[in-house]
Amino acid sequence: MPHTLADKVAIVTGATSGIGEAATVALSTLGAKVLACGRREDRLQALAGRLKKRGNEITTTVTDITDETAVREMMDTCIKHYGSIDILVNNAGVMLLGPVLDADTEDWRRMIHTNVLGLMYATHAVLPHMVKQSSGHIVQISSVAGRTTRSDSAVYNASKWAVNAFTEALRQEVYQHHVRTTLIEPGIVATELREHITHQETRKNIEDWAGSVRQLQPEDIAAAIVFALTQADHVDVNEVLVRPTDQEG
Ligand SMILES: NC(=O)c1ccc[n+]([C@@H]2O[C@H](COP(=O)([O-])OP(=O)(O)OC[C@H]3O[C@@H](n4cnc5c(N)ncnc54)[C@H](OP(=O)(O)O)[C@@H]3O)[C@@H](O)[C@H]2O)c1
């Protein structure tokens, strides 16, 4: 099993915090050249500065994943800059939990547009390059919420179930082109994800619960991503479900 990603070119979406930031550091550490994307330019610059100081090869792009044209331009930038795209970590996402009855439907649009359509735009834009290369690896950051359901999570659940269905169907379309797909399904991870929840009661409930368990750290999920990416070419790790030891459902 290769323990290096030297000479691989990777795009990581949502690299400005949490899992995406940790994945960018982990992939860079293994020698990948990374194009890191997000909307917060200051965070991207800080991350790039840290990694460049260590001698890692990284470039950044301020890209909103919900803008299909911008996503396509991001792929073109990567090809122009590095000449190929070997890995796409489709990580950008939002989790705006709350009950259906009280919902601000703008939260639904943001979740579906970011978690589902944004991930699909990036997949669609990267595929021609990977098929042409006859190799590539698309890692979709789904969730335990893509395998289970719970109240106050209906639309987030729906978005992640959509990611899982899309990815398995995609796998069946692209495996003959030697394009691998991996679903990563984390349980609760200590990131800023839930700080954006607008339904205050739901936010308090999840914060209280998070405080009662030993949460996963972003680096734990980066390790799962690296596990999938460092297998031999003939091995496609299709799905990795990682819960904190303390998480029941
Ligand atoms: N934390 C958990 O418990 C957990 C569990 C299971 C799955 N996940 C999944 O893991 C992924 C990463 O979440 P995280 O926990 O690391 O949360 P996070 O720290 O809030 O990171 C989310 C990332 O997504 C980016 N993002 C959001 N909307 C975007 C957009 N429209 N365009 C481009 N980038 C966008 C954010 O960057 P900008 O704001 O700078 O754009 C940020 O870098 C998500 O898909 C989430 O659903 C998280």
Image (cartoon, helix red, strand yellow):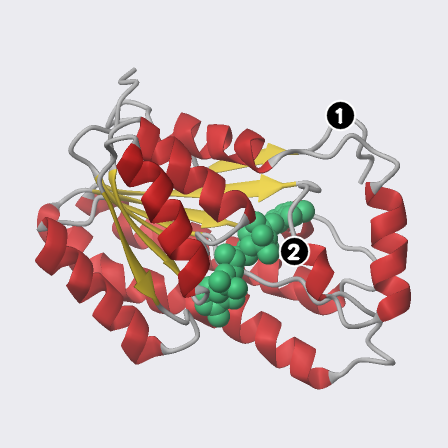
Q: Which residue is drawn at 43% across and 60% down?
A: 42
Q: Is residue 135 above or below residue 68?
A: above
Q: State which image quarter holds ligand 1.
A: bottom right
Residue nearest the observer in this picture, 26 or 139 = 26
Q: What is the x, y in percent for residue 112?
A: 57, 73
Q: Residue at x 55, y 60 (%)?
A: 93
User: In the orientation shown, which residue stands out farthest toward the top?
Assistant: 1
> Can residue 248 be seen from the camera position used here?
yes
| Left or right of residue 12: residue 113 | right
Mark 2 → mark 1, Cα distance in angstroms: 20 Å
Q: What is the x, y in percent for residue 76?
A: 16, 65
Kind of residue at badge 2: Leu
Q: Residue at x 44, y 67 (%)?
A: 39
Q: Do the residues labelled 2 and 1 touch (CB within 8 Å)?
A: no
Q: Which residue is drawn at 52% across and 50% down?
A: 17
Residue nearest the observer in this picture, 132 or 83 = 83
Q: In this view, does 95 lie above or below 69?
A: above
Q: In which quadrant of the rendered view does residue 77 lie?
A: bottom left
First reached walking from the N terminus: tag 2 or tag 1 = 2
| Left or right of residue 28: residue 162 | right
Label 2: how many Cα within 10 Å (few below 14, some 14–19, many 20+): some
| Left or right of residue 126: residue 226 | right
Q: Is residue 13 above or below residue 32?
A: below
For numbered disc 1, what is the local secondary structure? Answer: loop
The residue pinned by badge 2 equals: 193
Q: Is mark 1 within 8 Å of ligand 1?
A: no
Q: What is the x, y in percent for residue 26?
A: 40, 32
Image quadrant in which the C terminus is located: top right
Q: Is mark 2 within 8 Å of ligand 1?
A: yes
User: In the orientation shown, which residue stands out farthest toward the bottom?
Assistant: 105
The residue pinned by badge 1 equals: 245
